Every structure is written in structure tokens, then in C-alpha cells.
Image (cartoon, grey):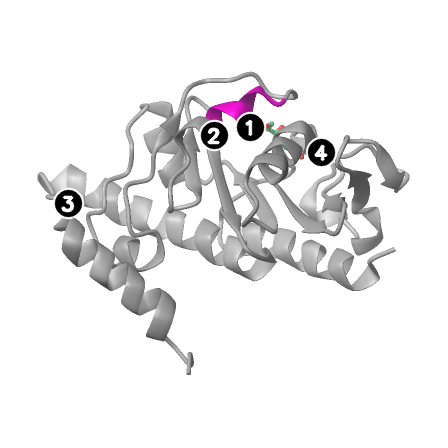
Amino acid sequence: MYEDLKNQLYEAHLNLEKYGLVAYTSGNVSVRVGSHIIIKPSGVPYDKLKPQDMVVINMQGNVVEGDLKPSVDSATHLYLYNNLDDIGSIIHTHSPYASSFALLNQPLPVYSTAHADVFGVEIPVSPYAPVGTEAIGKAVVDVVNQARAVLLSKHGVIVMGKDIQEAIRNAIFLEEVAKTAYFARTMGNPEPLDKEEAKRLFEFHHKSYGQKK
Ligand SMILES: O=C(CO)[C@@H](O)[C@@H](O)COP(=O)(O)O
């Protein structure tokens, strides 16, 4: 089932490693297709991962196809898909700069135009919740905003997108803007962008940036 999407999901995991967002087995990516979710198998190191290892589960979390156990974060992904209609793909990482804000319970303000372009608003922090249940999903839904990215207290990050490509872009840019914020804070006291300017940049970026017609 879903061979092409499994290949895309496999490539997405390799991208997480390529951009330094994960290490060894940390992190995971899923994609929604109809009433199924395809997600990374639990505990498989990235250099051992294969497209055919991706696990297909239904919206109740039961394995529909796959020889390996699905990610330990499957309940979190499922809760988010069941409560946020606009998302088609979810990425969880421990990317170091964004996760540092999560460990400090510090939201990530809109310090840069790049942050405004991609996310538009501050990245919130969700309260600590134990791994392996839908508790993380509930905590994320309680705080998630238009940014579709949340810093998980004491843990890491969750980003979402309408598809795998958008989720990957969001995961990469979250770490990028967190890195810039980290350095700015070590050198001084950066001020967030004006909210209206951030809104204008977000709207331009999402409507006109790149090759959009
Ligand atoms: O952080 C956690 C749990 O959220 C890690 O164990 C997670 O990144 C990787 O778990 P999986 O290998 O996807 O089961």
C-alpha cells in the first residue's frame, strides 16, 4: 500500500538528518492519506531505515500494514490529525536550537522577517506531557496557533503542514529562526517585529513568494 508516499516519507526522514534536526532514532514524520496514517517505525536508526519499513495505521492506531511497531508518538500524531483538519503531515524533532527554547519553556517571538514569512506569529510552548499517549497531542492542540509549530516543554518540537513538503519546510525554518534568535539573544536584547508588519510579511510570503502565480 502507498508505495509512493512511503518513499516520500522515507526521503523526508533523510532530510531531517541532512538538516541536523534529528539524530540516530530521534524524531519522526507521518502523513495522512484518507483514513490512514503512514508513520516511521519505532526505534529504527535513520541509516537502517527503508521505505518499506513505514507503518500504515488507521485512525484508531491499529496497524493496517507493516511488520514493525509504529512510532512511540503515534498517539500524538493521531490526536493532532483528529483535531486539526488542515494538516496532512506532522514532524516531531529534537532540533537543538528550537528544543533549547522548549527546555526553557520560552516561546519563540517573531524576531526576524524569516520567522514572519513562514510562521507569522510567536511559536508557543505546550506544557510537559508524557511520551507514548495522546497527552502530548492534547497539550499541543490547547496552544497551537496559525504557526502550526509548537515547542514541547522539556522535550522538542512538533511542526505540521498541509503536506510532507510544507511540514519539512516548517521544521527546517523553525530550527533556522530559533538559531538566529539564540545568537541574537547572546549578543543583546532583540525586539519582536511589529505584529502588523509580521502579518503583512506572512501574507505576502504565502501568497506571492517564489514561483506562485
Ligand atoms: O522523543 C521521543 C518520543 O517523543 C523519541 O523517542 C522519538 O523522537 C522517536 O521515537 P520513535 O522512534 O518514533 O518511536
**Among numbered discs 3 and 2, the one appearing first in the sequence:** 2
**Among numbered discs 1 and 3, the one appearing first in the sequence:** 1
Q: Which quarter of the rendered picture does the C terminus lie within? A: bottom left
Please state the horizontal and vertical placement of residue 179, each as a whole percent of the image.
Answer: 31, 46
Residue bearing mark 2? 140
Disc 3 residue type? Answer: Pro
Residue 28 quadrant: top right
Q: Is mark 4 within 8 Å of ligand 1?
A: yes
Please state the horizontal and vertical placement of residue 62, each as a whole percent of the image.
Answer: 83, 31
Please state the horizontal and vertical placement of residue 115, each as a whole percent of the image.
Answer: 29, 53
Q: Looking at the magenta stretch, what is its main secondary structure?
A: helix
Query: In the image, which is nearer the foreground, mark 3 or mark 4?
Result: 3
Residue bearing mark 1? 137
- Left or right: 115 with respect to 78? left
Q: Nearer the viewer, residue 58 or 193?
A: 58
**Among numbered discs 4 and 1, the one appearing first in the sequence:** 4
C-alpha distance separating marks 3 and 4: 36 Å
Residue bearing mark 4? 71
Disc 1 residue type? Answer: Gly
Q: Which residues are magenta?
A: 134-140
Q: Residue at x 29, y 32 (%)?
A: 107
| Mark 2 Cα-neighbour bin, 10 Å: few <14, some 14–19, many ≥20 | many
Residue bearing mark 3? 192
Q: Are marks 3 and 2 in contact (CB under 8 Å)?
A: no
Q: Nearer the viewer, residue 29 or 75?
A: 75
Q: Secondary structure at mark 1?
A: helix
